[in-house]
Image (spheres, rainbow, N blue to C red):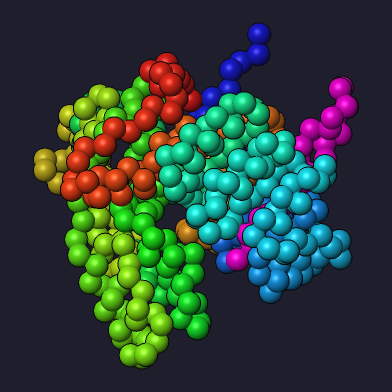
């Protein structure tokens, strides 16, 4: 009987194999392998970055799609240069033109790099069209979209992966390894947040709202939950022995975004009339089935130096805080003095990073984009499993809708659905 492959096996071995960008030939018994064929829907800044990494892995790119012709033409040029003049077909006839791309029979998978509001609808359509999906974060904006993703993946059997690159942070993969080995004891508390001042990204050069700005205008709550929650959820075994059960949200005023608008735009500019639902800072308290408390914060507008995602865990035997880049373990650390996290790297560094550190250099976000794309390509090549699957995507992304509902109801407790339908207690990997 073949050995069952779980998510950690993929993370350990997958990226190195994926560096070939190959897929198995459809002919039984044939040893020849062919490049994975991908299409990219959304080739703005982020989609183009993912496209470059996929090309570096050796994939073929028959088709590209973007609502902006300038973005599309730039991406076509990148592919032509990387593939000796082979020009992909472009799709740019409106926001639904990706549906024509999905009708092609020469695509194994798509990468969805569009604005967040349409990630779910594109991913669902792609799976129904028989394509594997790598979706940028978050996976969905509403609970209905979360459930639609889960149902579609289960019905079609297509591979779905959330491109949550923070799950590949070397120190968080090391921490997950240490927790699994019992060094922290039972985990009781986690703290995480996305605190990253990006107000300028809400507007284009003419002062019109980008997809981020439209999201800030239209939604309240934690609107970017996966960068911080994803790595913590993996450390806690969420959907694999524990699950997210409920949450409650509270928020500040929305002062910082208006201060920015008033400083950037003249008094008669249309941007001055926009009303934003998103607060400067939103805090969400999440409870798990095993009574672990997760304290999560989202702040994309408060004036501060650029920061990003942070993660912390507290166990019975020790604790970790990425803001301090430090670990303390009872019985190993000296007295009450923190240890630099690098102290444990040699002993507990994840095998993935031992094999990929050099190749990942310069790939974006400190190298974590590299294993994200490569692990997806390997899962496509081998038929799975997904390193960050649809149940993870739905659970983490549901925080958007549920935190907004909690705020709208004056801070009420919201139940988080069990997207695994009871399988969380026995799922592995």
Q: Residue at x 72, y 64 (%)?
A: 92
Specify the quadrant of the image occupied by residue 87.
bottom right
Specify the quadrant of the image occupied by residue 151.
top right
Q: Is residue 212 visible?
A: yes
* Identity of the residue furthest to the top in this view: 1
Q: Is residue 327 visible?
A: no
Q: Is residue 32 left or right of residue 17?
A: right
Measuring from the top left, give residue 19's x and y in whole percent.
Answer: 68, 45
What's the magenta region? Answer: 15-44
Q: Residue at x 31, y 56 (%)?
A: 220
Q: Quadrant of the N terminus?
A: top right
Measuring from the top left, give residue 158's x and y in whole percent.
Answer: 65, 32
**Residue in the foreground of this view, choosing between 296 and 376:** 296
Measuring from the top left, give residue 340's x and y in whole percent.
Answer: 27, 49
Q: Residue at x 68, y 63 (%)?
A: 94
Measuring from the top left, give residue 370's x and y in whole percent.
Answer: 57, 51
Q: Is 20 part of what is drawn in magenta?
A: yes
The correct choice, above or below, for 51 with respect to 413 in the image is below
The correct choice, above or below, for 366 with respect to 135 in the image is below
Q: Is 230 part of what is drawn in magenta?
A: no
Q: Is residue 72 left or right of residue 281?
A: right
Q: Residue at x 66, y 65 (%)?
A: 67
The correct choice, above or below, for 230 with respect to 360 in the image is above
Q: Is residue 24 left or right of residue 333?
A: right
Q: Is residue 205 left or right of residue 246?
A: right
The correct choice, above or below, for 347 with respect to 60 in the image is above
């Amino acid at each position: 009987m073949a050995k069952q492959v779980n998510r950690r096996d993929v993370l350990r071995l997958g990226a190195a194999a994926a560096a070939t960008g190959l897929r198995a030939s459809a002919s039984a018994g044939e040893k020849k392998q062919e490049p994975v064929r991908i299409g990219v829907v959304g080739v703005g800044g982020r989609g183009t970055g993912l496209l470059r990494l996929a090309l570096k892995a050796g994939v073929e790119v028959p088709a590209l799609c973007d609502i902006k012709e300038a973005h599309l033409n730039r991406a076509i040029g990148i592919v032509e240069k990387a593939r000796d003049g082979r020009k992909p077909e472009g799709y740019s006839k409106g926001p639904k033109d990706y549906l024509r791309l999905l009708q092609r029979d020469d695509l194994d998978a798509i990468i969805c790099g569009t604005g967040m509001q349409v990630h779910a609808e594109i991913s669902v359509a792609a799976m129904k069209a028989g394509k594997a999906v790598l979706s940028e974060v978050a996976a969905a904006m509403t609970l209905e979209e979360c459930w639609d993703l889960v149902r579609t993946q289960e019905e079609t059997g297509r591979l779905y992966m959330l491109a949550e690159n923070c799950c590949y942070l070397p120190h968080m993969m090391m921490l997950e390894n240490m927790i699994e080995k019992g060094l922290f004891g039972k985990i009781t508390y986690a703290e995480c947040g996305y605190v990253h001042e990006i107000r300028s990204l809400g507007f284009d050069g003419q002062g019109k709202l980008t997809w981020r700005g439209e999201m800030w205008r239209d939604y309240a709550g934690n609107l970017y939950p996966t960068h911080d929650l994803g790595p913590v959820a993996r450390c806690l075994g969420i959907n694999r022995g524990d699950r997210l059960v409920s949450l409650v949200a509270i928020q500040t005023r929305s002062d910082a975004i208006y201060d920015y608008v008033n400083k950037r735009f003249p008094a008669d500019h249309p941007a001055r009339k926009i009303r934003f639902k998103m607060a400067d800072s939103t805090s969400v308290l999440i409870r798990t089935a095993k009574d672990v408390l997760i304290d999560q914060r989202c702040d994309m507008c408060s004036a501060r130096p650029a920061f990003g995602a942070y993660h912390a865990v507290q166990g019975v035997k020790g604790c970790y805080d990425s803001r301090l880049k430090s670990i303390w373990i009872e019985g190993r650390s000296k007295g009450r003095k923190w240890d630099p996290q690098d102290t444990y790297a040699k002993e507990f560094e994840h095998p993935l990073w031992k094999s990929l550190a050099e190749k990942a250099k310069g790939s974006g976000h400190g190298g974590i984009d590299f294993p994200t794309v490569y692990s997806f390509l390997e899962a496509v090549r081998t038929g799975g499993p997904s390193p960050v699957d649809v149940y993870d995507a739905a659970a983490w992304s549901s925080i958007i809708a549920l935190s907004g509902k909690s705020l709208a109801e004056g801070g009420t407790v919201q139940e988080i659905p069990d997207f695994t339908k009871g399988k969380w207690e026995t799922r592995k990997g």
